[in-house]
Image (spheres, rainbow, N blue to C red):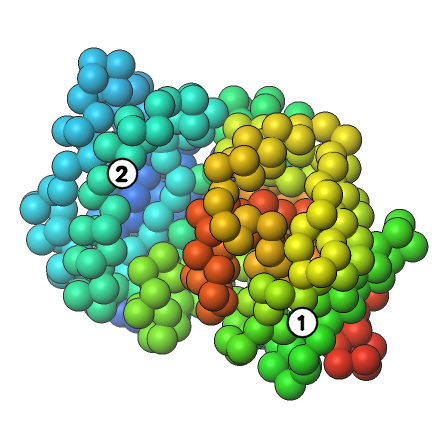
Amino acid sequence: MADPTVDPATATKLARSLLTRNLRLRAGERVMVEAWPHTLPWAVALARESRRLGALPMVVYEDEAAYWDSVDAGEAKVLGRAAAHEWAALGRTDVYIHMWGPGDRVRLNALPPKQQEALVAYNDGWYGAARKAGVRGLRLEVGRPYPALAEAYGVDLRQWIDQVVAGSTVDPAELARRGARLAKALRNGASVRLTHANGTDLTLRIGKAPARLWTGQPLPGDRSRPFDLLASVPSGAVRIALDETVAEGTLVANRTCYYDDGTATGARFTFGGGQLQKATFARGAERFEKPYAKGGRGRDRPGYLTFGLNPALHDTPQLEDGEAGAVLLAVGGNRFAGGQNASPFGGWAVVAGAKLEVGGRSVPLPG
């Protein structure tokens, strides 16, 4: 089990917040919670609080050591096989709560790509069964912090956990309030300009798809988008797809880019004629450059912008786009965000504290 240990009072507070404010759990509803050793304390609290609210919980447990024993034995296809009995239980489930597992994501990411694909071959079937059953649910980032990944990121595990928990208990209503004005401005605007004293000065054009606001609550409309079926928590972001033909200027990052196995820092993106002309990093450039080399057509085009709203996050691993006042610019594919670019590549840089203009008018960013 991951160390440090989870404080029971903290787990209870988090569980109560998620069940009442994010999921609005009702008495009699059937709840399924996915657990691994490092997330079991959170799962236990979620089950206990579900019962206190009159719901009916079930915890599905996967052991980390047993999982890796099967991987080492060459049983990836068995682990990734669709499980009819799990689908049957899912078909009678109202609420599903997922926490990341296995915990050792560094080890997972080091596996050959084909082996990784075999391990998650069930994914499409799971989402299909969940959508058919009308499940609503959450994907909890509290399952992400793990000793091996904290070491790879160079962060303190305790502080990482505490920040994720704090971000997960921010009221969705507060996130909605923070994002409403920004989302409206982006829906009504045509161009975006970002400036910062660090040298950032970048002009982009907003795409045709409307801005989307995330508050950590699953919404009925999200069921049509497979990976939006489960709302991610911590949440708090507004995202817009960009016109893939317009980008002029420079974005200088002042936040870390967190990849699955490490980091990239000091990003600087320079654009001209709607294309990424140059991308440099102080450290970790290979994490951008290697997939970029295989990205094909569209890899150098502006993809989307994400504006963070969550006041409890600050340079948080894997949650770069959620920090209040932070802006994430992605290049490459953006079809999933409503754009036209089908490139398989996706790279990003984040600047916090920038000034935003939409259609030539200043729009305050939540800070």
Mark 1 to mark 2 CA distance (whole Å): 36 Å
Point out the tag, 1 or 2, that comes first from the N-terminus. Answer: 2
Where on the picture, by quarter, is residue 160? top right
Where on the picture, by quarter, is residue 361? bottom right
Viewer-nearest residue: 350 or 167: 350
Q: Is residue 298 at all visible to an observer of this figure?
A: yes
Q: Residues within 10 Å of mark 1 (few under 14, many from 20)?
A: many
The quadrant of the picture occupied by the N terminus is top left
Q: Is residue 136 above or below residue 156?
A: below
Question: Residue 256 location in percent, x, y?
Answer: 69, 39
Pick out the residue farthest to the bottom.
188
Residue 120 - label = 2
Count of labels in the image: 2
Q: In this view, does 216 lie above or below 285?
A: below
Question: Residue 282 location in percent, x, y?
Answer: 77, 31
Residue type at mark 1: give it: Arg
Q: Mark 1 points at which residue?
A: 205
Instruction: Write the residue at 39% across / 44% down.
Output: 99
